[in-house]
Image: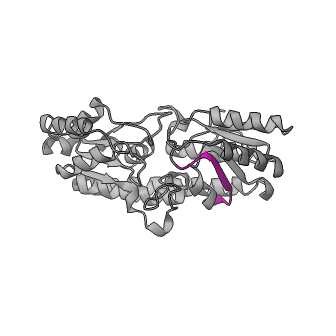
Amino acid sequence: MRVSRRTVLAGLAAIAVFPPLSAAKAQDVLQVVATTGMIADAARNIGGNLLEVRALMGPGIDPHAYRQTRTDIVAMAQADLVLWHGLYLEAQMQEFLFTLEKEGRKIVAVAESLPHDKLIAHDIYKDKFDPHVWMNPTLWSQVVIAIRDALIAAAPQHEAPFRANADRHLAELVKLANYATEALATVPKTSRVLVTAHDAFNYFGTAYGFEVMGIQGISTESEAGLQRMAQLVDMLLARNIKAVFVETSVADRNIRALIEGAAAKGHAVKIGGELFSDAMGVAGTYEGTYIGMIDHNATIITRALGGTAPARGMANLLSG
């Protein structure tokens, strides 16, 4: 979907009025704007106190539908570096982001660095890919490397600490991936079906051997039709699936309608838990970090579908 001409013109005006910060300022603390919390978290882990990072989209925000505000435009126009996801995740912002790039600003679509053979085709747009790559920590590690490289290019004087911090964070992601693999492997094979509000978990399914079924498609902009709901209700009954999942950034009405549809046919289905799909948890909490987000998802899914995982997750830090 195209943004309005008025929005783009407002962005151009903001770029003219608010020039980027001076080189001297950038050498002190690099001013970075990230579109999503996941990108912001990686940048903070890599940059430490050498960066000030602002995430445009907070907890519970749907990036597929998000449109930049006037405040966002000013922040991006003033930043030394803008990091966005790409792969058509920020569909409503894309035209402005391209405008920002044409104006000579430092702007990097970090997930666009992934090789196409590692990506899953989009269910609606034939020339695009499923953007939810953060659901696989191993794949996300490659995005973290792209973020590291963008930070080095923006502030080469800090290359050594950026590389050292990135190496530490990448080691943490290996530990996270190992935990998820081990925990999810305890779910009985017949129960490895993940039903959610929209198709945000395809990379998760590929990584851990789960069949993933979203009521909506990859984008939350798609509508859930009556035929799709009926098919999913029949599937729940036929495969004796007892748990489905809601998401923090998507309304739960379709999931609750699915549960009611199954109940009408005599099959009880519960909500297995609330998953983080397109956004992390509340800032300042463990679930408000990328590692906490994935730890939470892997633990909740494992326990709800009959596997074995510690109640408070990999690091005993989940809020419960």
Out of 280 and 232, give the one closest to the viewer.
232
Q: Position of residue 178 (x, y in %)?
A: 62, 58
**Could you tell me which residue is drawn at 43 percent across and 39 percent down?**
65
Kindly tell me whether residue 15 is visible in this rendering: yes
Q: Answer whether residue 37 is magenta in the image.
A: no
Quarter of the picture containing the N terminus is top left
Out of 92 and 248, give the one closest to the viewer.
92
Which residues fall within the magenta stretch?
A: 207-218
Q: Is residue 201 above or below residue 242?
A: below
**Could you tell me which residue is drawn at 17 percent across and 41 percent down?**
20
Please state if 242 lies on the left or on the right of 130 as rendered.
right
Quarter of the picture containing the C terminus is top right
Please state if 259 lies on the left or on the right of 238 as rendered.
left
Q: Position of residue 303 (x, y in %)?
A: 74, 44
Q: Position of residue 134 (x, y in %)?
A: 50, 52
Q: Position of residue 246 (x, y in %)?
A: 64, 37
State the count of labels.
0
